[in-house]
Amino acid sequence: MSFPLKRMRRLRKNKKIRDMVSETVLTVNDLIFPIFVKENIERPEPIQSMPGNYRLPIEHAVKEAIELTELGIPATILFGIPQEKDEIASQAYAKNGIIQQTVREIKRELGDRLVVITDICLCEYMSHGHCGIVEGGKILNDPTLKLLAKTAVSHAEAGADIAAPSDMMDGRVLAIRKELDKEGFEDVTIMSYAAKYASSFYGPFREAAGSAPSFGDRASYQMDPRNVEEALHEVELDIREGADIVMVKPALAYLDILYRIKTKFKVVTAAYNVSGEFAMIKAAAEKRWIDEKRVVMETLTSIKRAGADIILTYFAKDIAKRLK
Ligand code: PBG
């Protein structure tokens, strides 16, 4: 059948019909809100390039976590900004490190009412800002694995539900899984940043976390934006090593990657709507060049439509309020 017997517009004629036949649903259960916690500060510090986001003292991070539960958001991912950085990222796995303290406080307050995910990476804790141990200008893979596994265990001891390695060292998922299991944390989930690209969309995050590399870039460990087969390979390896959830990052410039991963592996797949994607929308909206609310909804719906089961986004609170 074709026109004039067939008319596509019949299913678009009013909002009720459009809602009935809609194929993609975005719900608050799909969202993860990132929180930045900073050691030894009294008051929240606004992040210039991420309007509405702050580096928080621990007490405020706990308040923020409570707000998330009130909004119905199921999970947060925590990023720590330590006071002291060194060449072995000791604050990443310190018993009383900023993340360990924050996880304990949030869990004491909320228990199972909020899923607490911790980003497992060393860049925020290294004086040089790279995600691994540096020797002679090179980022070493295998010695870094031990520190990542140690970090994951220390977060688990504090009560974290999900470990999210974002460093892109080879073999980190296996190293973390083994160490977690050895220490009795076989229930801790691993959400790996499996296809993480060496992207310029992380700029605002690096301002927020003070984690820009002091020399070179991350191209020797994060993925080349030109590659897609390689992303499938990365995901396959992470699944084999024990990842429960795989992630694509950034989201928008990589929706094709997300689609292919979901189609091929059919595992739980997350997408990170990163800081630069957030900043672009905020900046254009501030100039009144776009309608922020509509653009945000359209953007997140597109990530869901491409195959994401879960979306990490700085817009999570805004959307939760609107979906209520
Ligand atoms: C740590 C990490 C980064 C992000 C999440 N974890 C920065 C980076 O790899 O440089 C970026 C998140 C964002 O831009 O919102 N490695």
Image (cartoon, helix red, strand yellow):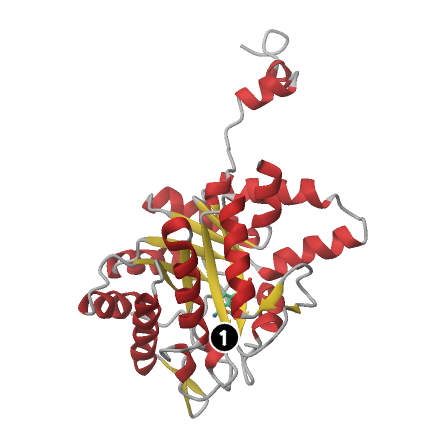
Q: Residue at x 35, y 53 (%)?
A: 245
**Residue 3's quadrant in the figure?**
top right
- Would residue 164 be found to the left or right of residue 203 on screen? left
Specify whether residue 1 is in view. Answer: yes
The foreground one among 268 and 252 is: 268
Residue type at numbered disc 1: Arg
Specify whether residue 194 is in view. Answer: no
Q: Could you say where residue 306 lies in the image, as x and y percent from the top left?
A: 49, 42
Residue identifier under label 1: 218
Query: In the figure, 42 relative to 291: above or below?
Result: below
Counting every numbered tag in the picture gives: 1
Query: In the figure, 71 relative to 220: above or below?
Result: above
**Residue with the most extreme top position:** 5
Q: Could you say where residue 265 lies in the image, as x and y percent from the top left?
A: 32, 46
The foreground one among 228 and 167 is: 167
- Would residue 98 be found to the left or right of residue 191 on screen? right
Q: Residue at x 47, y 77 (%)?
A: 123
Q: Residue at x 49, y 77 (%)?
A: 124
In the picture, the quarter occupied by the C terminus is: top right
Q: Could you say where residue 317 lies in the image, as x and y percent from the top left?
A: 58, 49
Query: In the figure, 222 relative to 189: above or below?
Result: below
Q: Secondary structure at mark 1?
A: loop
Q: Residue at x 66, y 62 (%)?
A: 50
Query: CB at mark 1 closer than 8 A to ligand 1?
Result: yes
- Would residue 10 be found to the left or right of residue 236 on screen? right
Other residues around mark 1 within 10 Å, as few (<14) / some (14–19) / many (≥20):
many
**Residue with the most extreme front position:** 109
Q: Could you say where residue 63 lies in the image, as x and y percent from the top left?
A: 54, 59
